[in-house]
Amino acid sequence: MIAGARRHGVVATQLPGTLEALLRELQAGHPVVVLQNLGLSWYPAGTTPC
């Protein structure tokens, strides 16, 4: 996603995975994209079987 943003001339950064970091960016008026893994703890989403 970072590379895709850069291709469109937008600076993207990865934030620490904390609520405080998220709230700080939102209060600054920066758009935020949150990726959430909704898979099972023993088989996370986005993995492929071997």
Image (cartoon, rainbow, N blue to C red):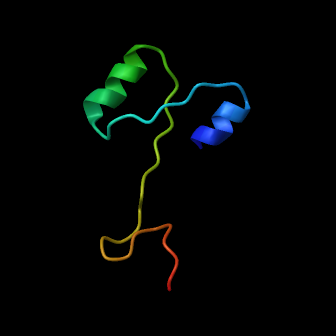
Query: Who's the residue at 66% across and 32% down the image?
Result: 6
Residue 8 falls in image quadrant: top right
Residue sitting at the far right: 8
Q: Residue furthest bottom?
A: 50
**Whole-percent x, y for residue 11 in the image:** 58, 25
Q: Is residue 29 above or below residue 23?
A: above
**Of 28 and 2, which appears nearest the observer?**
2
Q: Is residue 21 left or right of residue 25?
A: left
| Quarter of the figure with residue 14 | top left
- Give the answer, above or below, for where 37 lies relative to 18: below
Residue at 52% in and 77% down: 48
Q: Give the side of residue 50 with respect to residue 27, left or right.
A: right
The residue at 49%/20% (across/down) is 30
> Is residue 40 shown left or right of residue 12?
left
32 and 47: which is toward the camera = 47
Residue 18 is situated, as x and y percent measured from the top left of the image, at 27, 37
Q: Residue at x 42, y 13 (%)?
A: 28
Front residue of 10 and 38: 10
Number of disc labels: 0
Q: Quadrant of the N terminus?
A: top right
- Please say if 41 is above or below 4: below
